[in-house]
């Protein structure tokens, strides 16, 4: 269904993602990561490592975990280049280009009581870029590992998306759509938005035959879908 994902992207205007706790759907595949995050919040550890593949929801996880703490958001390179203020910071897009400068900033911040959520792809040891001291620091930090979303989580995201739009759909609609969509949060959310828009335009209810036709059109690359 790669063509479906491409068509969904082309047909819908981009909207800023919601990274609040209410829109973060918990499921079996992210339960252990959430427990690790809550344990870190209750600890005195300065850094939490959040890792996982692209599209696993690492940024959303970090924002949801830190909701109410007003976190600062920085790239790894920005933290390495200059210190930031008080409180907690989400350091997205690990690693930094300069591991020495990054380690200095991390150590300085930790010494002043600042806390960091470090998010990135791949194994955290690789973020050290060969710097032994940084690797030791990253491997010693508490870790929340996010996996690719499974079908149960995509199903829950779609169901919540329709509920948030106050659109009633039968479970059969969701069961039909889930295995036919790319298993990503972006595809799930775009599917909900596109189905809602198409139903409004055609003044029809969202039924399984309606979704079947919609997805068939998408897979064929129909620009009118």
Image (cartoon, rainbow, N blue to C red):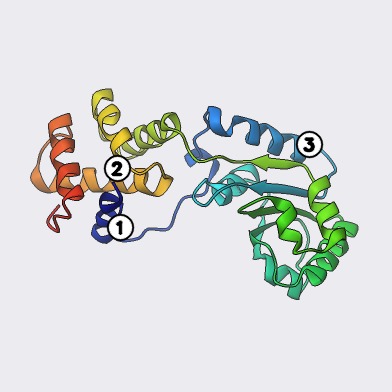
Sequence order check, earlier mark of 1 and 3: 1
Q: Position of residue 148 (x, y in %)?
A: 50, 41
Q: Is there CB contact under 8 Å for labels 1 and 3? A: no
Q: Where is residue 98 in the image (x, y as percent from the top left)?
A: 75, 72
Q: Which of 10 and 204 is in front in this view?
A: 10
Vertical placement of residue 177 versus 118, above or below:
above
Vertical placement of residue 200 versus 116, above or below:
above
- In the image, taking residue 175 as reference, residue 216 lies left or right, namely left
Q: Position of residue 27 (x, y in %)?
A: 52, 29
Sequence order check, earlier mark of 1 and 2: 1
Q: Which of 7 and 202 is in front in this view?
A: 7
- In the image, taking residue 64 as reference, residue 105 lies left or right, namely right
**Residue wearing tag 3:** 42
In whole angstroms, how far apart are the C-alphas of marks 1 and 2? 12 Å
Query: In the figure, residue 189 lies in which quadrant?
Result: top left
Kindly report which numbered mark, 2 or 3, lies closer to the viewer in this rendering.
2
Q: Which mark is residue 9?
A: 1
How many numbered marks appear?
3
Disc 3 crowd, CA 10 A, few/some/many (<14, 14-19, 20+): few
**Residue wearing tag 2:** 192
In whole angstroms, how far apart are the C-alphas of marks 2 and 3? 36 Å
Kindly report which numbered mark, 1 or 3, lies closer to the viewer in this rendering.
1
Q: Which element type, helix, strand or loop, lies under badge 3?
A: loop
Specify the farthest residue to the top.
171
Q: Which element type, helix, strand or loop, lies under badge 1?
A: helix
Q: Which of 152 and 61 is in front in this view?
A: 152
Please report the residue visible at 65 percent of the width from the left and 53 percent of the height from the top: 119
Please report the residue visible at 79 percent of the width from the left and 63 percent of the height from the top: 130
Disc 2 crowd, CA 10 A, few/some/many (<14, 14-19, 20+): many
């Amino acid at each position: 269904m790669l063509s479906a994902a491409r068509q969904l992207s082309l047909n819908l205007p981009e909207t800023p993602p919601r990274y609040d706790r209410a829109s973060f759907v918990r499921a079996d595949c992210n339960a252990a990561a959430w427990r690790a995050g809550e344990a870190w919040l209750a600890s005195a550890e300065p850094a939490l490592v959040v890792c996982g593949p692209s599209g696993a929801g690492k940024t959303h996880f970090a924002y949801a975990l830190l909701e109410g703490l007003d976190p600062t958001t920085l790239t790894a390179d920005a933290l390495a280049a200059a210190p930031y203020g008080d409180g907690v910071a989400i350091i997205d897009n690990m690693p930094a280009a300069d591991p020495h400068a990054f380690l200095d900033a991390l150590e300085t911040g930790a010494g002043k009581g600042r806390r960091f959520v470090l998010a990135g792809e791949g194994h955290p040891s690789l973020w050290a870029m060969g710097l032994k001291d940084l690797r030791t620091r990253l491997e010693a930090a508490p870790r929340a590992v996010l996996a690719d979303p499974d079908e149960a989580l995509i199903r829950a995201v779609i169901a919540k998306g329709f509920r948030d739009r106050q659109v009633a759909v039968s479970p059969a609609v969701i069961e039909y759509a889930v295995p036919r969509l790319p298993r990503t949060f972006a595809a799930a959310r775009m599917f909900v938005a596109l189905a809602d828009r198409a139903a409004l335009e055609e003044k029809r209810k969202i039924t399984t035959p309606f979704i079947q036709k919609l997805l068939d059109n998408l897979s064929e690359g129909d620009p009118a879908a």
